Image (cartoon, rainbow, N blue to C red):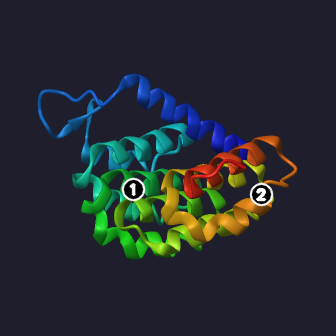
């Protein structure tokens, strides 16, 4: 789990550093065509598969079919980045809501979190808040922390999470406790 998170964070940092540079032609992204990136998802190299999934998420609406298909990939990292990418597309990705809703039941907690966040970004789905509340009870402190931050970004619309975030103030992890305190402030507008 920590390896997957580390790889995902490294890919995110790499893409942020590279930016959204595109070749002069609109169908080339980071030096490859959409078809080439889609094919890379099936490659042997885990890093390149994850990188391809992350790049597809940067391309936008044209990559939606590839991202929706990637939500079924055997690699949970690919599924996570596919969910994140669909969320980045925003409201234009409404047709992805059914596959993202299904991803809320994925075996990987990171995929569930990515799907919940994407559902919120696309369509303000209440199931997103429910899934993030459920993640606050995960055994992984990384998952709990991610869920707290996602609820804080949602803000007052995540008011159903207040009881669970109040419980998170007693979390064994100091980062989770501090993030929960800030999330409650962002949601309720009151410092605890």
Most extreme residue toward the left, as rendered? 25
The image's mark for residue 61 is none
Most extreme residue toward the front, as rendered? 190
In percent of the image, x 16 and y 40: which residue is there? 27
User: Callout 2: helix, strand or loop?
Assistant: helix
> Label 1: which residue?
87
Most extreme residue toward the top, as rendered? 17
Q: Quadrant of residue 144?
A: bottom right
Q: Quadrant of residue 170?
A: bottom right
From the viewer's side, name the closer residue of 97 and 64: 97
Sequence order check: which comes first, mark 1 or mark 2? 1
Q: Residue 140: horizontal and vertical position, in percent?
A: 77, 54
Crowding around mark 1 (Cα neighbors within 10 Å: few <14, some 14 to 19, many 20+) is many
In percent of the image, x 44 and y 69: which residue is there? 100
Q: Residue 157: horizontal and vertical position, in percent?
A: 48, 65
The image's mark for residue 168 is 2
Height in image: 48 above or below 191? Answer: above
Q: Is residue 75 visible?
A: no
User: Callout 1: helix, strand or loop?
Assistant: helix
Height in image: 190 above or below 16? Answer: below
Q: From the viewer's perspective, tell me whether residue 166 is left or right of residue 91.
A: right
Q: Residue 159: horizontal and vertical position, in percent?
A: 57, 67
Height in image: 179 above or below 156? Answer: above
Q: Residue 109: horizontal and vertical position, in percent?
A: 65, 61
């Amino acid at each position: 789990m920590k390896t997957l998170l580390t790889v995902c964070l490294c890919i995110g940092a790499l893409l942020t550093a590279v930016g959204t540079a595109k070749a002069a032609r609109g169908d080339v992204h980071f030096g490859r065509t959409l078809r080439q990136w889609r094919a890379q998802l099936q490659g042997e190299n885990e890093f390149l598969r994850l990188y391809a999934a992350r790049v597809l998420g940067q391309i936008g609406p044209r990559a939606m079919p590839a991202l929706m298909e990637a939500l079924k990939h055997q690699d949970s990292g690919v599924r996570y980045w596919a969910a994140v990418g669909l969320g980045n597309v925003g409201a234009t990705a409404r047709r992805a809501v059914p596959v993202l809703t299904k991803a809320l039941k994925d075996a990987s907690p990171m995929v569930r979190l990515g799907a919940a966040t994407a559902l919120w970004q696309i369509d303000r789905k209440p199931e997103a808040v429910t899934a993030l509340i459920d993640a606050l009870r995960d055994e992984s402190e990384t998952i709990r922390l991610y869920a707290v931050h996602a609820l804080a970004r949602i803000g007052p619309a995540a008011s159903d999470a207040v009881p669970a975030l109040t419980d998170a103030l007693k979390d064994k992890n100091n980062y989770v406790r501090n993030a929960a305190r800030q999330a409650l402030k962002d949601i309720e507008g009151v410092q605890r």
